[in-house]
Amino acid sequence: MALLVSIGHDGWYTGEQLAEELRSIAPGADIRPDSAPGNLQEITALAVSTLKGGLAAQLPNLQLVQKLGAGVENIVAHPGVAPHVRVARLKPQEPAYEIADYCLAYVLRGQRNMSAHAAAQSRRVWQPLAPRRPAETTVGVLGLGHIGGMTARLMRDMRFRVLGWSRSPKEINGVDCRHGADALPRMLGLCDYVCSILPSTPATRGLMDAQMLAAMKPGATLINAGRGDLVDEPALLAALDKGTPGHAVLDVVSQEPLPADSPLWRHPQVTLTPHVSGWHLGDALADVVENYRRIEAGQDLLHEVDRQRGY
């Protein structure tokens, strides 16, 4: 009975680093990095950021795939993950705060004319510009779950008018919460900034298509810190050329790493960051160890995913 750690991509923790941190929380537990997996028949739990192609199918006694984050779309339908294998995700506080902070940073960048001031400096031009008042600015948040709800409350506390959208009804004090497909395009037309924190599900993939993008307020900013497949990227580029929306901040894209020939790199109204909005696992490391203990004990899991619904 062992937990195998496989990050599945570069640029974050290594498997060795994370296995060491997990062992510090659970001394004596059999926690292995994928660089030294040992006997694969002993692996009952697999902790991943990105599930590598054939790894799960090589583990005959696998009972749990623990996602080291929130998005599980590439796990729940993975052909190598047998139907009986359970899937869990994380709902940590620290990266949720980081994602909310990321959205706020780019809202404030627009509010305080940061790009315009940087451009003026490059031309050696002294050009004062009035910042926009928060009370006169509407921020929309798509997805009002753990992270989206935190983002909406942060924007509210920064004195913005906040609209929230979700598939089912939600209530957040001080946030105008809306729900259902019919409400979304009307809400988009009211927002100066739209922050997407939506998961990847059949209902959200390609949600921001040409029609939805055209429903946005001219000159508005779309900030996507959820999942890259939310946005129809060719439609986004065409919409940006028309000024609706006026700018897009993308921390996630449909293919990561973004290919060098993608036109997103070169478009003047696109800001790209390499999937860094939520970084540190913080308190969630204890949940990884706890779920490993629970799967061995046959107990209910923390944050178990409904594989049919996809979240």
Image (cartoon, rainbow, N blue to C red):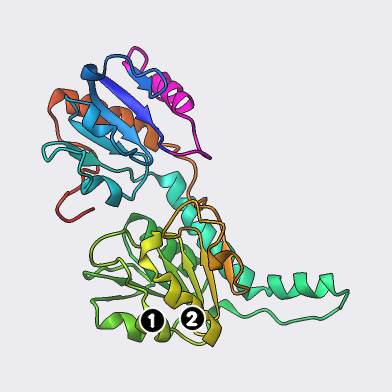
Crowding near pointer 2: few (<14 within 10 Å), some, many (20+)?
A: some
Q: Which residue is mark 1?
A: 210
Looking at this view, name the residue that lies furthest to the right: 124
- Seen in the picture, residue 179 relative to 43 is either above or below; the reply is below
- Residue 302, picture quadrant: top left
Which residue appears at 21% of the width and 54% of the height? 310
- Looking at marks 1 and 2 on the same chain, the residue that comes earlier in the sequence is marked by 1
Horizontal and vertical percent position of residue 25: 39, 22
Magenta-drawn stretch contains 24: yes
Give the extent of the magenta segment.
Answer: 9-30
Question: What amino acid is labelled 1 in the image?
Answer: Ala
Number of labels in the image equals 2
Horizontal and vertical percent position of residue 186: 34, 86
Magenta-drawn stretch contains 19: yes
Residue 110 horizontal side relative to residue 173, left or right: right
Question: What amino acid is labelled 2 in the image?
Answer: Ala
Which residue appears at 27% of the width and 14% of the height? 39
Q: Nearer the viewer, residue 80 or 72?
A: 80
